[in-house]
Each structure stands twice: as structure tokens, then as C-alpha cells.
């Protein structure tokens, strides 16, 4: 595996086709409908609309998801960014990301994101009768806060909502384009070869990337509004994805360490999650406190997230590697549904939360147990989100452009785009 010494080093460029990464991205995006619906009933989270009865069960279950789901999305986005950057160059990559991510972000800020905030006010105060159109100017009453980069626009009601992911992804992509233009290529290649050589040693692909994540999580804290991770930890996951895409030796190492990563992730979670509740029960804030238990919990959380990402990617890659020869038979129903959802990952992501909040606004008034309300909320929101994607987005060129979708001619039949594309 890539000796650091010697006159030559054999580099195997990472393949842009990683079906397991497409599958993870699609699973996480669709799963967010289930996740955000659960927050309506969560005892701790300050969601837009809250049910009268709440439970801590959702806190535990959501903790099992947030520790790996959004980090995996950023890593997958970094993987796709590396291949896009190599094809288009820094300038072309930056322009493409501004269109593909910036346009859906701007459209959603104007047309979608004010809705949950308006419904929050209506749900919190039965006497609130301000119309949506009268509320709208107050939503856009913003101030410039450069210290909150990249969330530089702040306001009493203004927010980027669930599109914080798109804001961060766009910011990290533009920073990557600037770095790619500024850094000498030979220096980057030498660094890649050294990292690949280190990754070939037992346990290094787990330990070395986990330590910066532990440090950032412990000292910078965890941002509850960003799915429980620091924005700078997400930058690391994005950069890890960029590095992963440069050489197959990183992929080999993750595949080899997958079982060890799974065991380590379970053990670290078993130690760290009780600390979360210990800090909370003591009246502290596990997300930001600088007490010993809070620092230890967040450090363990950072390491757990990396272990779970390595385990999930490595184990799925083991199943897909080596790939058996495919037949010429047309894809079955399951494959067609998967491709349909995978191609719509970004529109579904943009659409889902305003729909979940709108449905929850009515569901919480029902006289029914939490389980019944949750099942109904998920079912209705899922159907409405997919229907909105199908009927309002994917059928016309203009709406596909507004939601960052590629044109059908840009995607080969029976395939999904490369991860992060």
C-alpha cells in the first residue's frame, strides 16, 4: 500500500461510481421526514410545532441517527466535490455549485422557509392572528453578522432552517475551489501519498481522523440547531470525503477497518450517551458546558461519529466489492423507485420540512396517542413531499433549475448521479 519511500508510488484513483454512497444519501434524505416528524413529540427539542404530550424516547432514537447521518452526507458531498472539481477545474466547479446549491437556497428562503416560522408563532400563541403576508416582511428583517460565518444573515425571525446543510455545503465547496486554485498540485500529491501510506497501517484510518473531530466537538461545542455537530466538524467530514476520493487506498483501509469501527462505535456510544443525560440531569448544557463530563461526552461523540461513518461505509462497500457482472435485464420496480428518489434527493430535502411542520400543525390537535399521531404525520408528510417533488418540481425545466436538479440528458439511463453531484 503506497510506500512513502522509493522513487515511484502506484496510485489508484478512486472511482466516481460508489453505489453505496448514493444509497446512504437517499436513505438519509428520506429518513429526515421520519426524524423531523419525531421532533414534534420530543421532550427536549424546541421544534416549530410541539405536541402536548412528549417523550424522551425520541431523544435516544434521534441520538442514534444524528451521530452519523449528517456527517455521512457531508463526507459523501466531499467525495462528489472532488470528482466534480477534477472534471471542471476550480472556476467551473465554483460556478456549478453556485447554481446547483445557491439557486435552491435562494428560492427556498423566499418561498418556503418563512412558513415554519409563521406556524411556530401560531402554534405557540392561540391568540396570534397575523396573516402570513403581514408576517413576511418581519421574516426578512435581517442584520449582517460576519462572526456567524457562513450564517451571516441573522434576524429575530429569519433563519435558513433545515437548509443550514445547503449553506454549509456551498460555503465549504467555495473554500475548496479557492484552495484548489491556490495550492501547488505537487505538494497536494505528496500529502495525499503520505496520508495514504499512514492509512495503510492498522487502526490509523480510525484514530487519526477521529482525534480532530473529538477536539473540535469538545472545545467548540455542539450546535443543537445543526443536528448536534459543530459546523467546523462538518467541514472536517467534507474534507475527509475529498481526501477519500483521491486514492483507492483510503477506500481499502475503510473497508478493512469496518468491523473494528463498528465495535468501537458501539462501545464509545455506550459510554458517551449516558454522560449526555448525566450532564442534563445536573442542570448543565451538554452541548456547550466546559465541565469535565460535558467535555468528555462531546469528545466521545466526535470519535463515535467517525467510527460509525467508517463502519457504515466500509461494511456496505464490502457487500458491493467486488461487484458481480450485471445483466442486460431492465431494472425492477425497487431499482426504479430508488433511482427516482436518488435523483430527487435535493428537492426532497428542500421540500420536506415545511411540509412536515404544516402537517404537524393540524395533527397535534388530534385526540390520539403519540404513536398514532406520529404514524399519521409521517405518512401524510411523506406522501405530500413525494407528490410535491413529482408534480411541482421534476416535470418542468424551470422548476428543476430552481431546485438544483440536473437535466435528464445529463444522467445515464438506469444510473444515479455520482455522490454529491
Image (cartoon, rainbow, N blue to C red):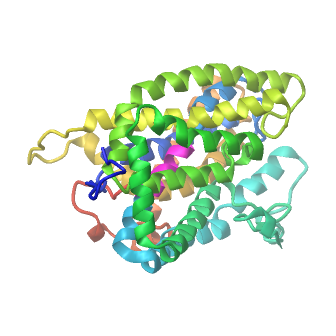
Q: Is residue 304 visible?
A: yes
Q: Position of residue 382 (x, y in %)?
A: 51, 43
Q: Is residue 19 left or right of residue 345?
A: left
Q: Residue at x 42, y 66 (%)?
A: 405
User: Which of 139/193 is in front?
Assistant: 193
Q: Quadrant of the N terminus?
A: top left
User: Which of 234/344 is in front?
Assistant: 234
Query: In this picture, which residue range is highlighted in magenta?
Result: 69-79
* Residue 323 lies in quadrant: top left
Q: Quadrant of the C terminus?
A: bottom left
Q: Residue at x 69, y 60 (%)?
A: 160
* Residue 217 in the image: above or below residue 292: below
Q: Position of residue 269 (x, y in %)?
A: 61, 24
Q: Position of residue 34 (x, y in %)?
A: 56, 37
Q: Is residue 135 left or right of residue 79?
A: right
Q: Residue at the front extreme? A: 6
Q: Residue at x 46, y 71 (%)?
A: 399
User: Which of 118/151 is in front?
Assistant: 151
Q: Is residue 57 visible?
A: no
Amino acid at each position: 500500500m503506497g510506500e512513502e519511500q522509493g522513487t515511484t508510488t502506484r496510485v489508484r484513483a478512486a472511482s466516481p461510481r460508489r453505489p453505496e454512497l448514493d444509497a446512504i444519501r437517499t436513505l438519509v434524505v428520506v429518513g429526515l421526514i421520519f426524524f423531523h416528524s419525531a421532533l414534534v413529540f420530543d421532550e427536549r427539542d424546541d421544534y416549530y410545532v410541539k405536541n402536548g404530550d412528549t417523550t424522551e424516547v425520541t431523544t435516544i432514537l434521534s441520538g442514534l441517527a444524528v451521530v452519523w447521518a449528517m456527517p455521512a452526507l457531508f463526507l459523501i458531498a466531499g467525495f462528489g466535490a472532488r470528482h466534480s472539481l477534477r472534471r471542471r477545474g476550480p472556476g467551473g466547479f465554483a460556478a456549478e455549485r453556485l447554481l446547483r446549491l445557491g439557486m435552491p437556497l435562494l428560492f427556498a428562503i423566499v418561498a418556503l422557509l418563512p412558513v415554519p416560522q409563521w406556524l411556530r408563532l401560531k402554534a405557540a400563541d392561540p391568540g396570534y392572528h397575523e396573516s402570513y403576508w403581514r408576517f413576511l416582511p418581519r421574516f426578512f428583517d435581517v442584520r449582517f453578522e460576519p462572526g456567524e460565518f457562513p450564517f451571516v444573515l441573522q434576524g429575530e425571525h429569519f433563519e435558513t432552517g433545515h437548509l443550514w446543510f445547503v449553506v454549509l455545503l456551498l460555503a465549504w465547496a467555495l473554500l475548496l475551489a479557492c484552495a484548489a486554485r491556490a495550492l501547488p498540485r505537487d505538494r497536494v500529491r505528496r500529502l495525499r501519498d503520505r496520508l495514504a501510506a499512514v492509512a495503510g497501517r492498522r487502526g490509523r484510518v480510525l484514530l487519526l481522523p477521529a482525534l480532530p473531530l473529538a477536539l473540535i466537538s469538545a472545545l467548540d461545542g455542539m450546535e443543537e440547531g445543526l443536528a448536534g455537530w459543530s459546523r467546523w466538524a462538518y467541514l472536517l467530514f467534507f474534507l475527509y470525503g475529498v481526501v477519500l476520493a483521491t486514492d483507492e487506498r483510503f477506500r481499502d483501509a475503510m473497508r478493512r477497518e469496518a468491523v473494528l469501527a463498528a465495535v468501537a462505535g458501539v462501545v464509545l456510544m455506550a459510554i458517551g450517551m449516558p454522560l449526555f443525560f448525566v450532564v442534563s440531569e445536573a442542570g448543565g448544557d451538554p452541548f456547550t458546558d466546559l465541565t469535565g463530563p460535558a467535555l468528555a461526552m462531546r469528545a466521545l461523540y466526535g470519535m463515535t461519529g467517525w467510527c460509525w461513518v467508517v463502519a457504515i461505509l466500509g461494511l456496505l462497500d464490502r457487500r458491493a466489492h467486488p461487484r458481480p457482472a450485471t445483466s442486460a435485464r431492465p431494472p425492477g420496480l425497487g431499482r426504479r423507485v430508488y433511482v427516482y428518489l436518488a435523483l430527487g434527493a435535493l428537492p426532497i430535502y428542500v421540500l420536506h420540512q415545511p411540509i412536515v411542520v404544516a402537517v404537524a400543525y393540524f395533527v397535534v390537535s388530534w385526540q390520539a396517542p403519540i404513536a398514532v399521531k406520529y404514524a399519521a404525520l409521517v405518512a401524510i408528510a411523506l406522501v405530500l413531499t413525494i407528490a410535491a417533488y413529482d408534480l411541482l418540481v421534476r416535470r418542468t425545466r424551470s422548476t428543476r433549475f430552481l431546485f438544483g436538479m440536473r437535466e435528464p440528458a445529463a444522467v445515464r439511463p438506469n444510473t444515479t448521479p455520482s455522490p454529491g453531484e
